Image (cartoon, grey):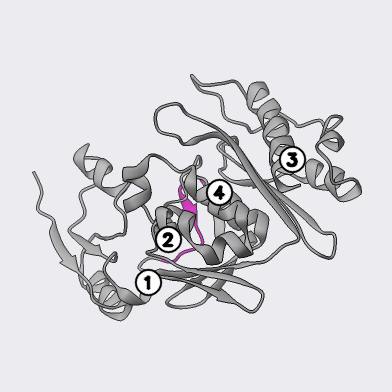
Amino acid sequence: MYETTYHRASSVDEAAAMFAKGKEAKYLSGGQTLLPVMKQRLASPSDVIDLARIKDLIGISATGNGVEIKAATTHYDVAQSDAVKKAIPALAHLASLIGDPAVRHRGTIGGSLANNDPAADYPAAVLALGATVKTNKRTIAADEFFKGLFSTALADGEIITAVSFPVVAKAGYAKFPHPASRFALTGVFVAKTSGGDVRVAATGASQNGVMRVGAIEAALKANWSAGAIDGVKISADGLLSDIHGSPDYRANLIKVMAQRAVQAAG
């Protein structure tokens, strides 16, 4: 057995100071990954530092050209937010599809991004929308944040404080969910800016986690329609293979989910 000391931080600075003092400390937000891993004895942190009650990490606000979501805001609150629904309806829709009610009421956007599960939903939205991840030390562009399976640009002890999403002309999300966990076996987020630029990101499909899908981006930039994706060839190289589907199966799912996302975006 091992001992873990629980701490409830009242501020970001206090949390960072607690982390620095711990030998193998871990931050806790919604606990949707850390707690199950601890129960399975796959992680044994010396200290668990709870960020969920820090007031400065909770809330959603409209900005001049988008919406900012604080890191400890739950999936449920994102899904129900009038500000998110008005600015980026597809983002609210994505949040409504995460897990079940228990998960949505506890899981947080910051925790999801820091963990960077390869089948999580939020990474697709962050990457496709070109969002900015804000931490207690700096800001990180979406294209620089995700580094592979369960890996991000976050330094040891760095805390996500908020995520800033820009408003786009059109956006949509569709996923093929695991029937039990509701994780994305493959999910695709599409976004088109007012200037005509297109970004498409897929989650749940790649061995390296969330990824841009350049072939679909090019097709949609030329013709924003579901039909424009019909002739796109998605390579199966580097895609996941497991009991749920082969790489070829996931390659096809990327196309199908992208078409549904475009239809949802309008």
How much space separates mark 1 and mark 4, taking CA atoms? 22 Å
- Nearer the observer, disc 2 or disc 3? 3
Q: Which residue is mark 1?
A: 57
Which residue position is annotated with label 4? Answer: 93
SS label for mark 2: helix
Q: Nearer the viewer, mark 1 or mark 4?
A: 4
- Measure the C-alpha gap from mark 2 to mark 4: 18 Å
Q: Position of residue 39 (x, y in %)?
A: 20, 40
Q: Quadrant of the N terminus?
A: top left
Q: Considering depth in this image, is 108 or 238 the residue closer to the camera?
A: 108
Residue sitting nearer the eye, 98 or 200: 98
Q: Do tag 2 and tag 1 residues touch (Cβ < 8 Å)?
A: yes
Q: Is residue 152 magenta?
A: yes
Residue 166: x %, y % from top left: 65, 68
Residue, x 81% and y 30% (percent of image)? 233
Q: What residue would you read off at disc 2?
A: 110
Residue 247: x percent and y percent? 63, 25
Residue wearing tag 3: 263
Instruction: Name which residue type carries label 2.
Output: Gly
Q: Predominant secondary structure in magenta?
A: loop
Query: Residue 88: percent from the left, percent from the top?
Result: 62, 60
56 relative position to 197: left or right = left
- Circle 2/circle 3 CB separation < 8 Å: no
Q: Does the stretch in magenta take in 163?
A: no
Q: Residue at x 54, y 67 (%)?
A: 83
Dot 1 or dot 3: first in sequence order is: 1
Q: Which residues are magenta?
A: 149-155
Q: Mark 1 against mark 3, which lies toward the viewer?
A: 3
Q: Name the kind of residue labelled 4 in the image.
A: His
Amino acid type, residue under disc 1 in the picture: Leu
The relative height of residue 88 versus residue 247 in the rendered view (above or below) is below
Crowd tier of the residue under label 2, counting other residues whose Cα lies within 10 Å: few below 14, some 14–19, many 20 or above:
many
